[in-house]
Image (cartoon, rainbow, N blue to C red):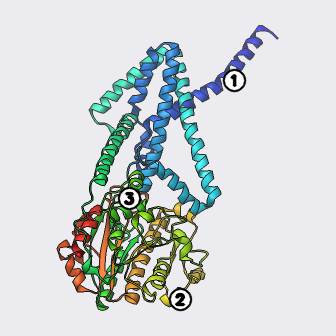
Amino acid sequence: MDRSQTVRHAGERTTRRRVPEWLLTTLAALLVFLALIAPPDIQHLTPLAILRIPVEGLLAAALLLVLPARPRRIVALALGSLLGLLTLLRIIQMAFSGIRGRQFDPVFDWPQLGNGVSLLEREIGLLGAFAVAGGAAVLAIAVVLVLALSVGRLARVATNHRRTTGRTVAGLAVIWLVCLTFSVQLAPSLPVASRSVVELAYQAGHQVRTSAENQRQFDAELSAADDTSVVGPLAALRGKDVVFAFVESYGRIALEDPEFAPTVKAVLDDGTRQLDAAGFGSRSGYLTSPVSGGDSWLAHATLQSGLRVANQYSFDKLVESDRLTLTSAFNTDWRTVAVMPANRGPWPAGDYYGFDQIYDEESLDIRSRTYFGFQAPDQYTLSFFQRTERERAGREPVMAEIALVTSHWPWHMIPYLRDWNDVGDGAVFDEPDAGQSASAQVVMLDNARMRDGYRRAIEYSLSTLVSYVQTYGDDDLVLFLLGDHQPPTYLIGENKGLDVPITIVTRDQAVLDQIADWGWETGLRPSPHAPVWPMESFRDRFLTAFSK
């Protein structure tokens, strides 16, 4: 082999070695760039998002260029790991904002990840939930590790080409400053002069400080002596059956979104006319829930305790306290029950609330193989409550908190309203014409189907409550029906607020006279101008009104 051939083969071998290195460097640069310019939410994930200049990358490159070799390696790995952690936070923020309708709280929201796994278990089974959780854990570790190694690699390449890197950084810095000065953006809320990572870190720090302050306020209110001066014998309700029925995800959006409102409002208006004809009066307003998109138990705790319970940490502290609840205010002259068709196993919070009887998924004893748990038909739940409590011989008045969960995510199984005499043990809901059902996976991947399912589920729940009052209502029934929270933002969009409707229904005009000063509007449907209260204010207003 002559010298020219040797040189040619050596060059080919060098090229073959360099191609994978170039590919790795290109991939590292792409991953780091995407992590730096990632927008704040899913709605801004557009092709135009990549046409931005991240100031964090420019600053990091300038720093790494001037550091000696050993410190440079350490700093590069540290910066890459930090970028990986912030990228994980960004992913969680996007998911949480899309589902809950609010920012992820880095202090108190970690338990919600476990709750998400539990919810997945109900929908896709234990094995599927573990697979998703395991995959997420592996992905989280991989994100941090890969970004750390990527920044380290780019630091080596940059210093090997120090002059070119320096000129590139300087040129991009000038462009960044010009774009910042003139607020250049290629899409709304996506400035070319990107500061995404800095803003994310700042927002996370601000959220930590805000959460800590809110928690200190909650702790102070919880530790302060509870003002029980408003608590009397609830004389205005003596002998009445008082029912608080939470309709899952029944938010103000159901009355305002153009896709939901026409038919939902028609159900409420028709219901108002039907109940009026049967002698029932109704008044409605709004409450501002502490949560959105989920965490129903926090809304229940807020209504019960008169404190704004906005996270799991606050909830855990509340249920260990002796703060007065609505339930305990009824305990002297009423039998108190909770009907929770989606609860499985022991419910420690039940002891705090002081219920005499708790019915969960097992004790509701529904025989349907299709509709149970989170899919339990509201009609079965109310029928069970009627049979076991309101029709029990020799009973005392009952106060009940009932969770109606047909309208729970993902809105893929909506039963039809049936004759109440046919409900029985629930097996009737397995009949072919019992409702509209689809797989959760199919519906979750189709936003239009989810929105249609949500609307139909809310209509079903409200129609069921109207029918229950028509069928079983009497002079002694006082029903409060209300939402627990708005549905998630991936269904309804952002900035829709936290308000939920609340309505009282009763045949006793004297009961309505007790709340005349509340200013609630006549009928089942509150108008846009109806009063809006913080949900935590309801307990004391209720106790004051009915202790007169």
Q: Name the amino acid, label 3.
A: Ser
Q: Closer to the N terminus: mark 1 or mark 3? A: 1
In front: 124, or 27?
A: 124
Question: Where is residue 129 shown, x and y percent of the image?
Answer: 60, 55
Quarter of image, res 241: bottom left
- Secondary structure beneath dot 1 equals helix
Query: On the rendered image, what quadrant is the N terminus found in?
Result: top right
- The C terminus appears in which quarter of the rendering? bottom left
Q: Which mark is residue 422?
A: 2
Camera sees residue 485: no
- For label 3, the residue is 292
Query: Disc 1 or disc 3, which is closer to the eye?
Result: 3
Which residue in the structure is indicated by mark 1? 16
Task: Check disc 1 and give the amino acid type.
Answer: Arg
Pick the front one: 164 or 396: 396
Residue placed at 31% from the left, 71% from the top?
502
Mark 2 and mark 3 lie on one chain; the one further toward the N terminus is: 3
User: Looking at the image, is 268 positioned above or below residue 173?
Assistant: below
Q: Is residue 349 above or below residue 339?
A: above
**Percent position of residue 89, x then y:** 45, 41
Q: Is residue 11 above or below residue 519?
A: above
Q: Tell me where residue 381 appears, x and y as whole percent.
A: 48, 78
Q: Is residue 205 left or right of residue 547?
A: right
At x 49%, y 64%, the residue is 347
Give the amino acid type for the residue marked by disc 2 in the picture: Asp
Q: Nearer the viewer, mark 1 or mark 2?
A: 2
Residue at the (51%, 21%) spot, across then down? 74
User: Residue visible at 64% across and 25% down?
Assistant: 19
Q: Left or right of 413: which side holds 234?
A: left
Q: Position of residue 231 (x, y in %)?
A: 25, 69
